[in-house]
Amino acid sequence: MRFPLFVRHLRECLAHAQALGTLSIVLLCAPLLASAHDRERPTSASPPSNAAFEAWLKTPSEMPSVSPRMVRHTIAWADVAPAIVYENGRRMRDPSIEPWRFTVTLRIDVARAEAVEQHFGVPMEALQFSYRSEAERSRLEKLEHDKLAQHGLRVLPTSDAQVGMLEPDFQWLIDVSRADINPVAQAVLRETDRVLRERGDARPVTVRDRVEAVFRFIQAIPYETIPDLPDGKDRCGLRTPLLTLLHGGDCDSKSVLMASLLRAACLAECAIVTLQMKDGTGHAILGIRVPTREGDRTIQHEGRTYVLAEAASIDATNDGDIAPLGVIGKEWSDFLKRPYKVVPVR
């Protein structure tokens, strides 16, 4: 995960701009902090150009229509739940009991997945414009913000109005993928129902059972650091849900995919939780509104309780014995002491 970057409109640049009559604004989302000092200031001999910014504004705002290109994609996963026992409050696994086994074969429209990915993000060179008055600045900023919103990004101001923060719009990613993700969610739930029927347990299947089944499915998807694509777009280190399903993803990409599945199936309310680890790097986990159990790690937000899920974890041995719902990594178990953000999604 990449933390959003703060790029300051430095006050000394304002003084420089008053003499020149122009100022460039840059917004970035990148893994390391930078400032306007890192950018070449405009000079009277070579005033900045808005060509890249204006060209970007003219690009299509709607998702392009593409001819379907379907592929079959099989995912298998396991759940060790029937073999888990508790002795003196300790979670233990009975090795004599086999985990439940699940398999789904999905039909994925690769052309659609690629089109969504290409539409998401912003060209780096477009994140700069110059202006000669505050009125023009406000007009261009509105155009910029509206255009970013059409491509799954947004700029959040801070209290001093001197900082812009570019971040992904998680709700946009979920909404734009909902129709494509819904068949995947339904396939996972059908397979879950099949396995749970075969177990012969008379206990009714709960919402939490279904959420945990989706969670195990997510843990079967590989973890992968998201590389920069050759198109030069900044996507804040995210991959869109369908491509995450096909190729794997990092913590926030897998969290968004899991939220997409749960919301498409109308299983539970969710929130993306972004946090800062002790070394200053970023991480993302998912909060899910399900009935809590003893020992669950939860977070409170706007009067709601979310059970936390470590979507980045993977079942490398395919035996289902990995982090259960309500457990997060020890490295960031004290994340409430550091900056974090909760973003509910519908």
Image: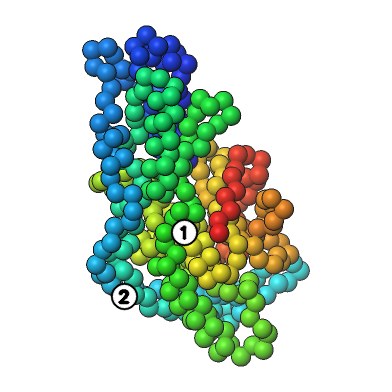
Judged from this view, the residue extending furthest toward the right is 88
Residue at image mark 1: 174
Marks counted in the figure total: 2
- Residue 296 drawn at (x, y percent): 68, 61
In screen coordinates, is 307 left or right of 227? right
Judged from this view, the residue extending furthest toward the top is 19
Q: Which is more toward the observer, 79 or 187?
A: 187
Task: Report crowding for label 1: few under 14, some 14 to 19, many 20 or more residues within 10 A (C-alpha).
Answer: many
Task: Measure how far apart labels 1 and 2 are at the Cα level.
Answer: 22 Å
> Which amino acid is tagged 1?
Ile
Q: Which is more toward the observer, 57 or 29?
A: 57
Q: Is residue 197 above or below residue 144?
A: below
Earlier in the chain: of badge 1 and badge 2, it is: 2
Residue at image mark 2: 72
Q: Residue at x 49, y 54 (%)?
A: 171
- Residue 195 drawn at (x, y percent): 53, 84
> Which amino acid is tagged 2?
Arg
In screen coordinates, is 285 left or right of 149? right
- Residue 309 drawn at (x, y percent): 58, 60
Quick one: SS at disc 2?
Answer: strand
Q: Residue at x 31, y 69 (%)?
A: 109
| Circle nearer the viewer, 1 or 2 | 1
Quick one: SS at disc 1?
Answer: helix
Please identify the quarter of the rendering in which residue 244 is found: bottom left
Q: Residue at x 38, y 48 (%)?
A: 151
> Which quarter shows the C terminus?
bottom right
Q: Is residue 294 above or below residue 251?
A: below
Please identify the quarter of the rendering in which residue 205 is found: bottom right
Please identify the quarter of the rendering in which residue 275 is found: top right
